[in-house]
């Protein structure tokens, strides 16, 4: 059966009546009034605004220790009692590079309140490529090296960047797959609530 194709509009469709225009604008004004009272969509829920995955059941973050670019080491359990922003990244990953400056600003803003940004590099070349990147971008948060992907395997990381947010009790609570605006209003709201 052939479907009739519409080829023209009627005059009533082209020129809405005075009554329908009034109804449309009244509805629009009412919607704007509600939005101005409530705030922008998503402002009340930073998890939704940042498109984060919230774990349904409590899961303890798995401890690990990795070498650091400076020759030392980084151990997750050293940050117990703090909110940990655990990020998996690589110097060759454009979205990772994109979010690094925002992560640094987030870290500087909330470090004194108990936020730790811990970035675990997946670069197989290790410190030889990570150290120059860290210096070039003036990153001050702790960096770990996961050359063989052992830590990424513990957390089921399949793509970069991937971020796991761990609460003060050591529970894995939120996951972000891909880059985010980590120094925007939604992120500030999220971390301010977690750091209380």
Image: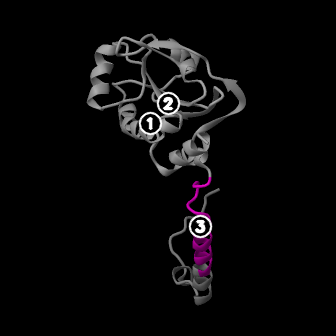
Magenta-drawn stretch contains 35: yes
Badge 3 marks a residue whose secondary structure is helix
Viewer-side residue, 98 vs 104: 104
Which of the image's four quarters has the C terminus? top right
**Which residue is farthest front?**
112
Say if mark 2 contacts mark 1, CB within 8 Å.
yes
Which residue corresponds to mark 1?
107
Which residue corresponds to mark 3?
35
Viewer-side residue, 129 vs 76: 76
Q: What secondary structure predominates along the stretch shown in magenta?
A: helix
Which residue corresponds to mark 2?
116
Q: How is the image coloured?
A: one colour
Region rendered in magenta: 26-44
Say if mark 1 contacts mark 3, CB within 8 Å.
no
Distance, label 3 to label 2, CA atoms, is 35 Å
Badge 2 marks a residue whose secondary structure is strand
Viewer-side residue, 5 vs 44: 44
Task: Say few, some or many: other residues with alpha carbon within 10 Å of mark 2 (under 14 / 14 to 19 / 20 or more).
Answer: many
Task: Say few, some or many: other residues with alpha carbon within 10 Å of mark 1 (under 14 / 14 to 19 / 20 or more).
Answer: many
């Amino acid at each position: 059966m052939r479907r009739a194709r519409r080829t023209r509009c009627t005059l009533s469709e082209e020129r809405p009546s005075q009554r329908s225009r009034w109804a449309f604008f009244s509805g629009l004004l009412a919607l704007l009034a509600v939005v101005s009272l409530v705030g922008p969509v998503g402002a009340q829920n930073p998890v939704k605004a940042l498109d984060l995955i919230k774990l349904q059941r409590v899961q303890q973050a798995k401890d690990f220790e990795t070498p650091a670019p400076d020759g030392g080491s980084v151990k997750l359990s050293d940050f117990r009692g703090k909110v940990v922003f655990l990020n998996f990244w690589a110097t060759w990953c454009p979205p990772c590079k994109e979010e690094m400056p925002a992560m640094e600003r987030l870290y500087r803003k909330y470090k004194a309140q108990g936020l730790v940004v811990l970035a675990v590099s997946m670069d197989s070349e290790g410190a030889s490529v990570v150290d120059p990147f860290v210096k070039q971008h003036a990153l001050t948060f702790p960096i770990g090296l996961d050359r063989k992907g052992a830590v990424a395997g513990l957390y089921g990381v399949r793509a970069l960047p991937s971020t796991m947010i761990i609460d003060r009790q050591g529970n894995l609570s939120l996951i972000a797959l891909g880059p985010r605006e980590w120094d925007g209003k939604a992120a500030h709201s999220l971390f301010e609530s977690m750091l209380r």
